[in-house]
Image (spheres, grey):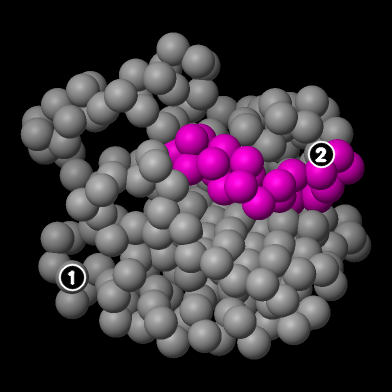
Amino acid sequence: MSGPRRSSGGWRERQEKDPWVQRARKEGWRARAVYKLAEIDRRERLLKPGMLCVDLGSAPGSWSQYVSATLKGRARLVAVDLLQMDTLPDVTFIQADFREEATVEAIIEALGGERADLVMSDMAPNLSGNRAVDQPRSMYLVELALDLCRDVLKPGGDFVSKLFQGEGSDALIAATRKQFGKVRVMKPAASRAGSREVYLVARNYGMM
């Protein structure tokens, strides 16, 4: 649910030329996706010392890395991905399929009886290039992440998720507005201009 979606030489060439990829390497971040979260945080002021976060679709770990580095050890994270992720300070990593109920139970156990201040998801399916197939798969992952909020997010908590605009996205945004006090859709500068990718930013869970 993370990492490159295509293995073609064209994809690799675009990555090598991508200024966000080059900047991430220079600055020591694990992936260009860090700049998407950084912009959302800068505009929304999501991160607060002492917070507890859940990071879905975490590998290679740039979002967890950003939270850990920004809060300088004053945060605790539970990160989940199908792919292996190298260790990070303050991060408990679960390598598992988030679509499985056992993984949700493992997340709840890792939280140790506490509820999270922030659930964030950069999950995406392996894209086939067929929108009729890819869009339902991507929507399913966002729906699962939103469902997790009911199990682990504290009242007043926040939710950030990758979302591909298309069939089902408007209905999901409307459903999110019924659960959160404030909902925005953002397209960070690091999101490719031609992509349907945006980010759903929902604040104040349970305080509509």
How far across and down, in percent of the image, does residue 129 sit?
Answer: 14, 60
- Residue for point 75% across, 73% down: 205
Query: Which residue is disc 2 drawn over?
Result: 75
Q: Residues within 10 Å of mark 2 (few under 14, many from 20)?
A: many
- Residue for point 58% across, 62% down: 201
How many numbered discs?
Answer: 2
Would residue 99 be seen by someone viewing this image from the given angle? no
- Amino acid carrying mark 2 in the image: Ala
How far across and down, in percent of the image, does residue 14 sit?
Answer: 17, 31
- Residue for point 42% across, 65% down: 163
Q: What's the CA distance linking mark 1 and mark 2? A: 38 Å
Q: Kindly identify which numbered label has been placed on residue 190.
A: none
Whether the magenta-drawn stretch holds residue 76 is answered as: no
Query: Which residue is disc 1 drawn over?
Result: 131
In the picture, measured across the screen, residue 85 lies left or right of residue 79, that is left
Above/below status of 36 relative to 153: above
Residue 22 falls in which quadrant of the image?
Answer: top left
Q: Residues within 10 Å of mark 1 (few under 14, many from 20)?
A: few
- Considering the numbered disc 1 on the image, is that residue within a helix, a strand or a loop? helix
Above/below status of 194 relative to 148: above
- Considering the numbered disc 2 on the image, is that residue within a helix, a strand or a loop? strand
From which residue to which does the magenta span run? 33-55
Would residue 196 be seen by someone viewing this image from the given angle? yes
Precedes in sequence: disc 1 or disc 2: 2
- Amino acid carrying mark 1 in the image: Arg
How far across and down, in percent of the image, does residue 42 sit?
Answer: 63, 41
Question: Extreme top residue here?
Answer: 26
Q: Nearer the viewer, residue 45 or 154?
A: 45
How far across and down, in percent of the image, does residue 188 sit?
Answer: 43, 47
